[in-house]
Image (tube, rainbow, N blue to C red):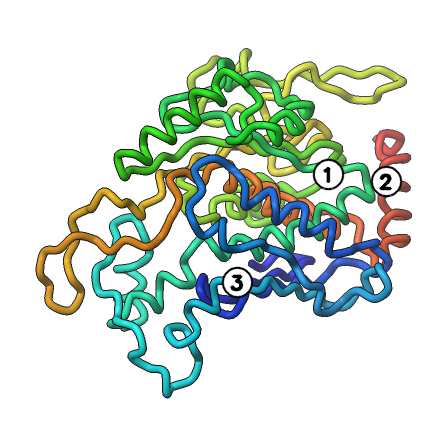
Amino acid sequence: MMFSKLRFLTSGESHGRGLVAMLEGIPAGLPLDEDFINTDLKRRQQGHGRGGRMKIEQDRAILMSGVRWGNTLGSPISLLIENRDWENWRPGMSPDSNQAGSIPPVTRPRPGHADLPGALKYGHTDIRNILERSSARETAARVAAGSVAKKFLAEFGISVGSYVMSIGSVSIENPTSPADTALFGTADDSPVRCPDADASTKMVELIDSAAEKGDTLGGIFRIIVSGAPVGLGSHIQWDKKLNARLMMAIGSIQAIKGVETGAGFEAARRLGSEVMDEIFYEKERGFFRKSNNSGGIEGGVSNGMPIVITAAMKPIPTLKKALRSVDIISHEAIEAAYERSDTCAVPAASVVGEAMAALCIADAMLEKFGGDSIKETRRNFDAFVENHDKTL
């Protein structure tokens, strides 16, 4: 994904040899090790409702470049996550032409996946050429890159966390309550990353019920960025607005169908006097708000309040309960193909959401403060924080 100051790419197929993430733009001098990255990779693999693939993989990132003796060099950082399942797929996913035809082609597209439009777009008669890359397995590489961005943001007192608000018909009691960063730790103690213990129990029961029926579930999760300064993003062009950039980043995650910032669609149901965050000033605090319906962004610019993003994930479209489809070769009505999958991946998606938000905010920080080294970026950041109120 292309940002203005960070360049971020992933590559790799679901059952290929591995996944690769490359991140360019992180300044020199950032302390970084594999254990920090692997903590988030482990979080992504957890959550009630995950499928058999998570029992096979034990994702660990290998720092291939850009780090020497525990510190970033300022050069591109590349990360490798090896697929353990590759051993079971060597002939079928081999780059060697001699292995062509070693496994049958997939010709039954699954509704809701990239299968059919991807095959039509690229002219493939084997849908595996599409589903391997469109798989959410790719998000492991995003989480690895996002962990590097989190480490960068932590240098400036900025944290990124998330929690699950609903799965299927079960929601926490007050989904529109103000963001509370204390919920992050509580969320990680839940099997579905939900900070409400009662709702968490009901979500687990709902997932088990769906699994028994061969069905799947989606849900809603919230991401909160705390400590971001005023002035990230800009109002001057459509593609510089921070809310738009975050919506694109989160909306690019597989199965995400809706993204809101702040009160989102709820704001459209209220009077203006109930939505706008009134402005106050105290000499010791500077400018501040007593509410955060804007979600920390006004006019495309961060305003110093926590940045709040909410995302809706559709049910996973790979179902054991067969869906009707059409064979792409024979054009006959058939049942869609089934690939090993999850019943519910909302908890994992929330961790992926953290990664994408972290990458987006890190990009905006570098756009605002620059710096080829962490020391230079911090110097620019500290000077801004110290003086921005005084310049008005």
Give the residue type at disc 2: Phe
The residue under the point 18% across, 65% down is: 328
| Residue occupied by mark 3 | 84
The residue under the point 42% across, 32% down is: 219
**Upstream in the sequence, badge 2 or badge 1?**
1
Q: In this view, does 339 lie to the left or right of 303?
A: left
In the picture, which quadrant includes the N terminus? bottom right
SS for dot 2: helix
* Mark sitting on residue 260: none
Label 1 Cα neighbours within 10 Å, binned few <14 / some 14-19 / many ≥20 = some
The residue under the point 70% across, 69% down is: 64
| Residue occupied by mark 1 | 231
Displayed quadrant of residue 319 = top left
Give the residue type at disc 3: Arg
**Foreground residue among 327 and 238:** 327
* Mark sitting on residue 384: 2
Q: How far apart are marks 2 and 3 (CA)?
A: 47 Å
Q: How far apart are marks 1 and 3 (CA)?
A: 44 Å
The residue under the point 28% across, 53% down is: 338
Q: Position of residue 294 (x, y in %)?
A: 59, 26
Which numbered disc, 1 or 3, marks the residue closer to the eye?
3
Displayed quadrant of residue 61 = bottom right
Give the residue type at disc 1: Gly
Q: Say if residue 230 shows up in the picture.
A: no
Q: Position of residue 246 (x, y in %)?
A: 57, 43
Q: Are marks 1 and 3 in contact (CB under 8 Å)?
A: no
SS for dot 3: helix
Vertical arrangement, residue 2 with respect to residue 358, above or below? below
